[in-house]
Image (spheres, rainbow, N blue to C red):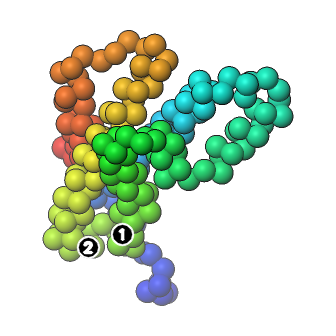
């Protein structure tokens, strides 16, 4: 006997796997953005207060405080009074949050069993979120490159970066 409350359709299809892969790559990129914001906040904190490194206790307090912060606090700390930067990073933060906490909320059964319209709308929404997230990631990645004296990307690469990310996340043909 298979009670209805249990999931029982375990068949995998190429179509479903392709869509699950899109969601997985979106989650990966959302995690990347959050990690980069935390890393940049650390870099800024150390550059502004080199005394942080003077004692193990100060380092421990600094790290402990950073771990307690939510993404919005990292974004606010990075953007400061720059309203344009704040807007870009906040759009990325909101996109990350929706991807991490809401995008899969309706996927409570095998994706093959859901209405095609639902999946089409989900993919369309995910595409818009990824673009917002990629634009914010581009800014954070660029700032980290500048702060750490890493080689800077070309203008063409920076311009196309959100498109590259979108293609990578949304690819379903392979």
Q: Position of residue 71 (x, y in %)?
A: 51, 50
Q: Quadrant of the C terminus?
A: top left
Q: Is residue 68 above or below residue 167?
A: below
Q: Name the disc covering residue 107, or none.
A: 1
From the viewer's perspective, is residue 2 above or below residue 107?
A: below
- Determine whether label 2 and label 1 are within 8 Å by CB: yes
Along the viewing direction, whichever of 154 and 46 lies nearer the viewer: 46
Q: Position of residue 116 (x, y in %)?
A: 17, 69
Nearer the observer, 161 or 171: 161
Q: Nearer the viewer, residue 76 or 21?
A: 76
* Disc on the earlier residue, 2 or 1: 1
Q: Which mark is drawn over residue 172?
A: none
The residue under the point 72% across, 44% down is 64
- The answer for how far apart the CA atoms under marks 2 and 1 are is 8 Å
Q: Which residue is mark 2?
A: 114
Residue 1 vs residue 89: left or right? right
Q: Few, some or many C-alpha atoms within 10 Å of disc 2 (few <14, some 14-19, many ≥20)?
A: few
**Res. 35 in view:** no
Q: Is residue 25 left or right of residue 168?
A: right
């Amino acid at each position: 006997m298979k009670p209805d409350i249990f999931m029982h359709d375990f068949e995998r299809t190429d179509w479903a796997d392709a869509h699950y892969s899109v969601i997985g790559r979106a989650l990966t990129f959302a995690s990347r953005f959050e990690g980069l914001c935390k890393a940049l906040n650390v870099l800024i904190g150390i550059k502004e207060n080199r005394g942080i490194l003077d004692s193990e206790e100060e380092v421990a307090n600094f790290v402990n405080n950073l771990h307690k912060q939510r993404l919005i606090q990292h974004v606010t700390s990075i953007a400061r009074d720059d309203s344009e930067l704040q807007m870009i990073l906040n759009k990325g933060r909101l996109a990350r949050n929706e991807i991490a906490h809401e995008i899969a909320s309706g996927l409570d059964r095998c994706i093959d069993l859901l209405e095609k319209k639902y999946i089409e709308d989900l993919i369309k929404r995910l595409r818009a979120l990824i673009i917002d997230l990629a634009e914010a990631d581009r800014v954070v990645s660029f700032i980290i490159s500048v702060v750490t004296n890493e080689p800077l990307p070309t203008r063409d690469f920076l311009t196309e970066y959100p498109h590259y990310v979108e293609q990578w996340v949304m690819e379903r043909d392979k």
